[in-house]
Amino acid sequence: LDLDQRPPGRAPLDVLHDVFGYESFRGSQAAIIDQLVSGGDALVLMPTGGGKSLCYQVPALVRDGVGIVVSPLIALMQDQVDALEAVGVRAAFLNSTQDAMARREVEQAFREGDIDLLYLAPERLRLESTKQLLDSGRIALFAIDEAHCVAQWGHDFRPDYLELSVLHERWPQVPRIALTATATEATHREISARLGLDDAAHFVADFDRPNIQYRIEAKDSPLQQLLRLIQTEHPGDAGIVYCLSRNSVEKTAQSLVDRGIDALPYHAGLDAATRQRNQSRFLREDGIVMVATVAFGMGIDKPDVRFVAHLDLPKSVEGYYQETGRAGRDGLPSTAWLAYGLQDVMQQRRMIDQSEGDAQHRRALSAHLDAMLALCETVECRRVQLLAYFGQQSTACGNCDTCLNPPSSIDGTIPAQKLLSTIVRLKRERNQQFGAGHLIDILLGKRTDRVASNGHDALTTFGIGGDLSDVEWRGVVRQLLAQGLLAVSPDGFGTLLLTEASSEVLSGARPVRLRKEPERVRASRSGRSG
Ligand code: ADP
Ligand code: ZN
C-alpha cells in the first residue's frame, strides 16, 4: 500500500482540473507551484492577465493550512472571495470594510482551519492582534500580491508594504511568493531586498503582448484625435480612455456621449455606488468606453477590451505597460494609443517639482518620466524599447507605429539653437517668466501685446523661426525637454531654462536630432492644446 503523506487527489494538476476546471498549467505556473509546494520562496514577474492567482491558490490548496494573501486591492477582495467560493474554495478576507462581527467570524474560521485562503489588507499586519491571530492557526503560505508596492523606487509605493518584512522574521518556515506585473531590474532587486527574498527562485515571464499595437502620436486636438480612433478603427468596441484629472475624465466622457458613444466616467471623486455601477456595466455590457483616471483597472479582468487610449502622458513606463495591458487579454488584435504633447511634459515636470518627498524621491519620479518620454520620442520600434525596459531583448515587431510608418529624424541643431538663444536673450530680463508660447511667438515674429510691451520684437531672434509652424516649434520644445536640452523652472509659470547640455548645442559642439512629426500634425495650425 502506498502511504504517501499527501492526501489523495491533492496533486497540483488534480487541483487545477478538479477545482478550477482548467486543462493544463500555463507558462511557468507549474514550476512556481512546485517551488511553493516543496516549501521554497518565489518571486514572480508576470504581466497582467498572465495567471498569477493560480500560482498561490493551487499551492494553498495542496499544502496544509491556510494560504494568506496580502493584497492592497481592498475593493476587489469581495469579488475574489466570491469567485473562489463559486468553485468551492473556502475563502475569506479581513479588511477595514467589515464590522467587528464579520471579522470575528473570519478569525474563528481561520483558527479552526475552516478556510483555504485568507485575504488581508497590508495595514492589518501592523496590528499585533493580527499577528497573534496568524500564530493561532496553520499557515500554508504567504502570497504578497502587487509586490512592487514595497519598492520606493517604483510607481506605486505603499508604506504599509514595508511592514511585510515581518512575515519571514516571525514565520521563517512558511514559504512566501511575491507577485507583480510591473517590475524593472531595479524594482525587482528592491522587492527582493525589502522582503528578504534572497533565496527565492525567480520566475520572469515573457512580457510581450504581440496582439497589442502600440501607437504614440503628438497631441494637437486630443478629442478629435480620440474620436478619429474610436470612429474609424473601433466603432462599437469596448475600450478604456485614461485621463490624468477627474475633470478631464468628466469632460471627455460627456463629449463622447454627445457624439453617440456609449461612454461612462470613473474616478475616485465619484461616489462608491456610481463607481460600482459604471464598473459592472463596463464588465457586463458590450461596447462600453470607460473614461477613467488610473484609479480604474487594477484587477479588472475583461477579455475583450479592444483599445486603451491615453489622453495624457502616463508617469512611468510601468504604468503605461500595465494600463495598456488591459487591452486584448483574449489575444485578438487590439490598440494601445497615446497622444501626448508639450503641455504633458511641462505639467508632469511641475508635478514632480512640487511633489512631497525628498530629493531622492523626486529623482526617482524624474527618471520614470524620462524613460516614458524616451519611449514617446523614439524612432525605433516601440515594442523593442518597451520590452527592453523590462529587461527583455527583441527584434522590430512590424506592428507598432514606428515599424509601420518609420518616422524620419531631421537635423534639429539650427532650430534648437534659435530657440535656446532666444532663451539666453530673455534671461537677461530678471523676474520675468516666459513660457513656450511666448518664445514661439517671438520666433514666429508675432507682434502680440506681450511681445510688443516687452520690446521683444527688437530681439535679434524675432521672426527668425518662420520656416517652422507653431505646432512644429512646440514639437521642438517638447523634444528638447525630453532630451534634457531644456528644463522647466519650478516657478509654476512654465518658464523654460537652459541646462548644462544646452550650452553644448549653442556652441555647436553637440548636434541635435529631432523626430519629424507626421504630415497631419505638421499641417495642423490649431496647436495650442498640445
Ligand atoms: P493576473 O493576476 O496575472 O492578472 P489572473 O490570475 O487573474 O491573472 O488570470 C487571468 C485569467 O487567466 C483568469 O481568467 C484565469 O482564470 C485565467 N487562467 C490563469 N491560468 C490559467 C490556466 N492554466 N488555464 C486556463 N486559464 C487560466
Ligand atoms: Zn515595432
Image: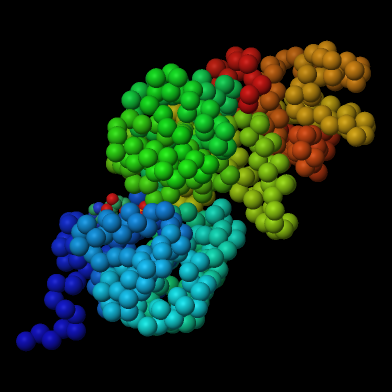
Q: Which colour scheme is used?
A: rainbow
Which residue is more in the foreground, 206 or 72? Answer: 72
Is 203 located above or below residue 400 in the figure?
below
Counting from the top left corner in percent of width and height, residue 320 is at 50, 43
Which residue is more in the foreground, 163 or 503? Answer: 163
Residue at the (73%, 46%) spot, across then down = 353
Residue at the (92%, 34%) spot, across then down = 430
Residue farthest along the left direction in this orientation: 1
Which residue is more in the foreground, 483 or 45? Answer: 45
In the picture, which quadrant includes the C terminus? top right
Q: In this view, does 22 lie to the left or right of 450?
A: left
In the picture, which quadrant includes the N terminus? bottom left
Q: Is residue 188 left or right of residue 234?
A: right
Counting from the top left corner in percent of width and height, residue 483 is at 68, 39
Q: How many marks?
A: 0
Which residue is more in the foreground, 381 or 95? Answer: 95
Work out whether residue 407 can be spotted. no
Q: In this view, does 75 lie to the left or right of 513?
A: left
Counting from the top left corner in percent of width and height, residue 459 is at 90, 20
Is 259 located above or below residue 43 in the figure?
above
Residue at the (39%, 23%) spot, across then down = 261
Residue at the (32%, 76%) spot, across then down = 108
Is 144 located above or below residue 292 in the figure?
below
Question: Which image quadrant for residue 518?
Answer: top right
Work out whether residue 165 can be spotted. yes
Question: Which image quadrant for residue 487?
Answer: top right
Is 466 located above or below residue 19 in the figure?
above
Counting from the top left corner in percent of width and height, residue 497 is at 80, 37
